[in-house]
Image (spheres, grey):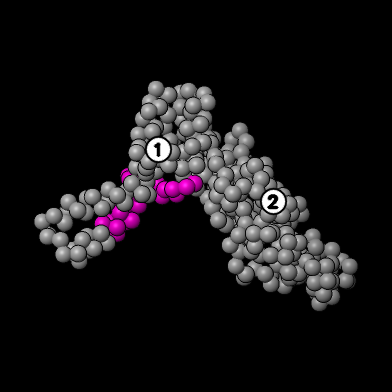
Amino acid sequence: MTSITNLIKELREKTGAGFLDCKKSLEENNNNIEKSIEALRKKGLAKASKKSDRAAIEGGVGVYSNDDIVVLIKVNSETDFAAKSDTFLDFVDNLGNLVLENNSNLNKEQFLNLKYDNGSVQDYFNSMIAKIGENLILNDLIIKEKKKTDYSFYIHNSYRRNIGKIISLLEYSSTDKNSDIESLSKNLCMHIAAMKPESLDINDLDKNLINNEEKIQRELILNSGKPSNIVDKILEGKMKKYFSEITLLNQSYILDQNKTVKEIINEHSKSNFKIISFELISL
């Protein structure tokens, strides 16, 4: 690396400021690190590194799509006040649209290292941390490739049409494209946001999770003094209740508690409606 590149790297490490801000500050201060740090502090651009260890539990989740992919992104801030600001919401929108422009399957680390202007997306984060004055964290990035399926989503506590505190995304297939199917998909998204299932069906659950729950329930039954010859039968009932609480298809449907989600879907068998997958992302 050249000497100026080394100086920029050092200044970025010491201040957390963006690449261009560091470069400009060094140019204005004859490549003097200490004077450049002072100049950045005066401009309020040397805040990022000092705020990076502060808790960020508020923020927003956004959904974006084009012909090829659907993107869910979660950015945390420290306060709800900042999360509702246009500055923060524009930032989330810019990030979501940047993923769409890149149009490929990225993980969080790859996205943060992606080139943005003359720096990286991480530099963009650092500059926004300085501007907003709060720690900002890219907490989730989910990219779904569009196939021969349809998508529907629901936003709870929305800040904008596509940004809120909770987003549920449903991938489904159907031979019919009508208002009834569209309404069903939207209602299922609302159900997912409200009931927070952990998987689509029992077979999709982690086997270790199931085994652990069985051990716990068996222990509770034995400790309650039930006769050993009926433990297995009681356990079967306990596990059935457990599955009905955490698997989408076996949950009671929020708009008709007397039916399961699976039964509601079966009522649309003529449309061959089928849930392919779902995502739930929330603060």
**At which x and y percent is residue 256?**
40, 38
How packed mark 1 is, by other alpha carbons closer than 10 Å (few <14, some 14-19, many 20 or more), is: few
Read off the magenta span: 193-214
Q: Considering depth in this image, is 227 or 136 the residue closer to the camera?
A: 227
**Label tally:** 2
Residue that label 1 marks: 256
Q: Position of residue 181 (x, y in %)?
A: 48, 28
Q: Nearer the viewer, mark 2 or mark 1?
A: 1
Mark 1: amino acid: Asp
Q: Outermost residue, bottom direction?
A: 34
| Residue 53, picture quadrant | bottom right
Residue nearest the viewer, comparing 185 with 272: 185
Q: Looking at the image, which residue is at 69% across and 59% down?
A: 82
Residue 144 visible (yes or no)? no
Residue 209 among those drawn in magenta: yes
Q: Which mark is residue 201?
A: none
SS for callout 1: strand
Q: Which residue is mark 2?
A: 89
Separation of marks 2 and 1 at Cα, in angstroms: 36 Å
If the image is split into quadrants, where does the C terminus sit? bottom right
User: Image check: 36 left or right of 246?
Assistant: right
- Amino acid under disc 2: Leu
271 to 161, vertically: above or below: above
**Residue 37 drawn at (x, y percent):** 80, 73
Work out whether 121 lies above or below 33: above
